[in-house]
Image: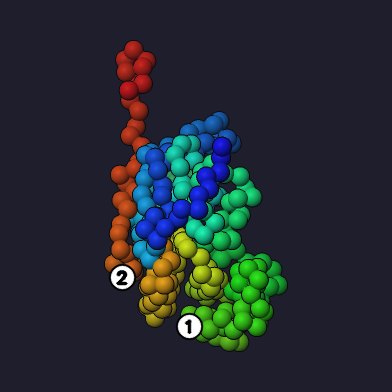
Amino acid sequence: MTVTTSTEHSADSPLLDVVGVDKTFVMHLQDGVELPVLSGLGFRVHRGECVVLDGTSGAGKSSILKMVYGNYGVDRGRILLSGNDGTVDIAATDPRRILAARRNQVGYVSQFLRCVPRVPALQVVAEPLLERGADADVAEERAADLLTRLSIPERLWGLPPATFSGGEQQRVNIARGFLPDLPLLLLDEPTASLDAHNRDVVIDLIREKCSRGTGMLGIFHDSYVRTAVADRLIDVASFIPRPTTQEPNGAVA
Ligand SMILES: Nc1ncnc2c1ncn2[C@@H]1O[C@H](COP(=O)(O)OP(=O)(O)OP(=O)(O)O)[C@@H](O)[C@H]1O
Ligand SMILES: [Mg+2]
């Protein structure tokens, strides 16, 4: 049985419950070299809470977001995502159910915008609402509001973001990720290339979304942002696998 469904989701139950997750990357193009990254990972995110993944570069923070979003598989453990559709174990379910969870339960603001050629910025931002059946005028109006708030000048709205500056692309990406109201939002360094004003706008957007009940799981290298938004920190270093040691008799301890 791969899909866990339940209609017993209450306001107190976590939106995300990560239980005993291990992750090892296997480099198939490098003679199958194995890279253990996480062991026994466990934490929860509740409604309205901003949980921040804390740890050094390479600790596995982005990998955690990708596992929760269903981009990376896991070796062991459960990733229980709850919402109006019930609860699904992202670590064990099928691709169709993962796509449904992305539509109704979890959003993801990746570090970089994946630009689709020839699609103008306003459409890129409005698209997630249009896909969910919103009226085109309403979707574009809300997209325009968010682009204005994030200081993207109106002269750029009709242009594809491929040639935008790094910070402009990042703000388009944030607007796109923040527009739909989903129960859980994953943020991978959304403020990395922003100036102080836009960084503060993003802090406000995060707080507003949390106050409306969205749970956030984020990564922020900037300690100013981390302090401003984090309700709780998860120390990813505490889930780094312990190196196995080889005993003289060949046994692995
Ligand atoms: N697809 C992949 N294939 C192989 N190894 C990977 C893959 N993705 C991540 N890794 C490895 O897993 C480890 C953790 O990477 P990850 O990107 O999760 O770190 P991070 O904590 O987000 O780091 P940073 O703060 O630099 O963004 C790294 O050693 C990385 O090389
Ligand atoms: Mg990362």
15 to the left or right of 84: left
Q: Position of residue 23 (x, y in %)?
A: 45, 40
Q: Quadrant of residue 210?
A: bottom left
Image quarter where the C terminus lies is: top left
State the SS at label 2. helix
Q: Residue at x 32, y 64 (%)?
A: 230
Question: Which of the marked residues, 1 or 2, is nearer the chain's N terminus?
Answer: 1
Answer few, some or many: residues within 10 Å of disc 2's Cα (few below 14, many 20 plus, some between 14 and 19): few
Image quarter where the N terminus lies is: top right
Q: Position of residue 216 (x, y in %)?
A: 41, 62
Closest to the observer, 28 or 10: 10
Residue type at numbered disc 1: Arg
Q: Quadrant of residue 208?
A: bottom left
State the SS at label 1. helix
Residue topped by disc 1: 149
Q: Position of residue 64 (x, y in %)?
A: 44, 50
User: Against 188, is 63 above or below?
Assistant: above
Q: Residue furthest right?
A: 118
